[in-house]
Amino acid sequence: MRARVLIRPKAGILDPQGQAVERALPALGFDGVRNVHIGRLVELDVEDPGQLPAMCEQLLANPLVEDYQIQRPDADESSQNVGPARRSR
Amino acid sequence: MKFGVIQFPGSCDERDALAAVSRVGDAVLLWHREHDLRGADAVIVPGGFSYGDYLRAGALARFSPIMVEVERFARHGGLVLGICNGFQVLCEAGLLPGALLPNTSLRFVCRQVLLDVVNADTKWTGACERGSRLSIPAKHQTGRYWAPEPVLDELESNGQVVLRYATGNGFNGSARDIAGVCNHAGNVVGLMPHPEHAVDPLTGSADGLALFESAALVAACSTDWVGGHR
């Protein structure tokens, strides 16, 4: 099944890439933009979605400095947006 | 005294590391797929761009087959030095605390820097003098050392901060200007600057040689030292 992992820098850690983009947008005429953060998207087909959290902890994210959110876009509503803070199964 | 220098696909500073350690001992190149440290008394994880820094710098290299041996060697007290990308690999592998993040400037910087020796009691700084300064080139884009504040406090009080950028020499935004750290036992050290590029006056400074001499001293002074394979 298709899974999607969003990896974000942890809140509170300086994100100079996000800041650079935040500064660039007004130069293009886009005002009123705040709090820009740059992360990473990993998309994969998995046979066992139960392995996804371990994949995130060990490889896809660095849990010291990144948060991750697992999404299963093809699954039913109740199992979408599974992340480490909200894992219910 | 035998030094093993790891080579991952994408490493580029293993060559200078081999040349540097050859000045104080024997050197052997260890391809990342090998399962044997070949009797090395000390292991160097070199600089470069292992796996192209894909995903995160060092994130893939830490799972190379040779790293199983390096981790076992380190946990048994073996001498391990991570330089730049090697430092990133060791942090990703959990052999050193903290993480390396993109420089605050987002720029790749290649510059000679002055480092203060904070801890001269680690296995890699024994030949240095505490409080002395080393002139060593730094060249990296992802060298901002970070750890949670409580961990940083612990590192300071445990003496695990090994090298600091001297006043005015920090450029990457590292927490507390930390340039290098060690594990609790002091046998594993990681630093972002490149001592292997500072072993001959020809390139401006030979201050880096002291780190490799320190390791050679450990082997020479310990009568029952069998390269960490006790």
Image (spheres, coloured by chain):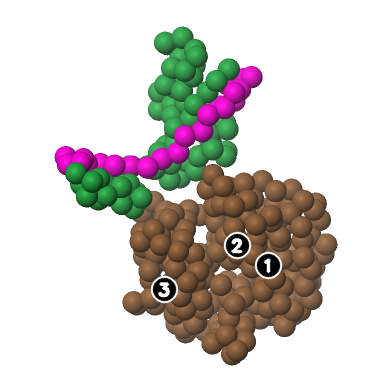
Chain colours: A green, B brown
Between discs 3 and 1, the one toward the N terminus: 1
Amino acid type at image mark 2: Gly
- Tell me how many marks there are: 3
Segment colored magenta = A30-52
Mark 2 — residue?
B48
SS at mark 3 in the image: strand
Question: Do marks 3 and 1 share a subunit?
Answer: yes
Vertical relation: B230 (above or below) A57 = below
Q: Residue at x 57, y 31 (%)?
A: A54
Inter-mark Cα distance, 2 to 1: 8 Å
Q: Position of residue B86 (x, y in %)?
A: 60, 60
Inter-mark Cα distance, 3 to 1: 24 Å
Q: Residues within 10 Å of mark 2 (few under 14, many from 20)?
A: many
Q: Chain of mark 3?
A: B
Q: Residue at x 17, y 41 (%)?
A: A31
Which of the 4 quarters of the picture holds residue A11? top left
Are circles 2 and 1 on residues that touch, CB within 8 Å? Answer: yes
Amino acid type at image mark 3: Tyr
Between discs 3 and 2, the one toward the N terminus: 2
SS at mark 2 in the image: loop
Amino acid type at image mark 1: Glu
Mark 1 — residue?
B14
Which of the 4 quarters of the picture holds residue B115? bottom left
Mark 3 — residue?
B165
The image quadrant where one finds the N terminus of chain B is bottom right
Q: Residues within 10 Å of mark 3 (few under 14, many from 20)?
A: many
Q: Mark 3, mark 1: which one is toward the viewer? A: 1
